[in-house]
Amino acid sequence: MSDTLFSQIIRREIPADIVFEDDRALAFRDINPQAPVHVLVIPKQPIAMVAEAQPTDEPLLGHLLWVAAQVAREQGLTNGYRLVINNGADAGQTVFHLHIHVLGGRSLQWPPG
Ligand code: 5GP
């Protein structure tokens, strides 16, 4: 897949407020937060969207959920939070490097728009 700005964040070519990093994942604050806590969890290995994940990506996908839970805990989201993955145009995906939105710190409405 082609390079995105998230790959540039992984390579530290553009700045980001990083809150978690390990060998497979990076988490950083969204530049346009939709809640008091809005963090993006991304794989270091670029996958454009969840629909393009391969069977061999299954452990990585599970790891990203685990990272999202750690980030939520570290950010103090003890009263609940929402994890969102936008997949493709109809979902409003704008950056084609798979990411999990971790949203919390306020009461969230359902259903989303
Ligand atoms: P999507 O709409 O693809 O699910 O989410 C992409 C997210 O990336 C948006 O919430 C947007 O605010 C965020 N974003 C876009 N560009 C940047 C950037 O340069 N830095 C950071 N930290 N977030 C970004």
Image: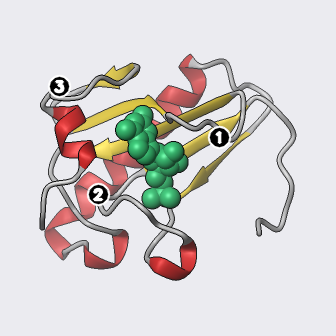
Q: Quadrant of residue 106?
A: top right
| Residue 103, numbered circle | 1
Q: Amino acid at mark 2?
A: His
> With respect to residue 1, does 103 lie above or below?
above
Q: Nearer the viewer, residue 53 or 87?
A: 87
> With respect to residue 70, does 59 lie above or below?
below
Say which element carries label 2.
loop
Q: Which residue is mark 3?
A: 12
Residue 103 showing in the rendered view: yes
Pointer 3 or 2: first along the chain: 3
Q: Is the N terminus in the top left, top right, bottom left or bottom right quadrant?
A: bottom left
Q: Nearer the viewer, residue 82 or 113?
A: 113
Q: Position of residue 85 (x, y in %)?
A: 50, 61
Pointer 2 or 1: first along the chain: 2
Report the residue at 76% width, 28% height from top: 105
Say which element carries label 3.
loop
Check disc 3: other Cα within 10 Å, few if <14, some if 14-19, many if 20+.
few
| Residue 97, numbered circle | 2
Q: Is residue 13 left or right of residue 31?
A: left
Q: Position of residue 103 (x, y in %)?
A: 65, 40
Q: Is residue 71 left or right of residue 17?
A: right
Say which element carries label 1.
strand
Q: Nearer the viewer, residue 16 or 83?
A: 16
Q: Amino acid at mark 1?
A: Leu
Q: Amino acid at mark 3?
A: Arg
Pointer 1 or 3: first along the chain: 3
User: What is the tally of numbered marks visible in this picture?
Assistant: 3
User: Is label 2 or label 1 in front?
Assistant: 2
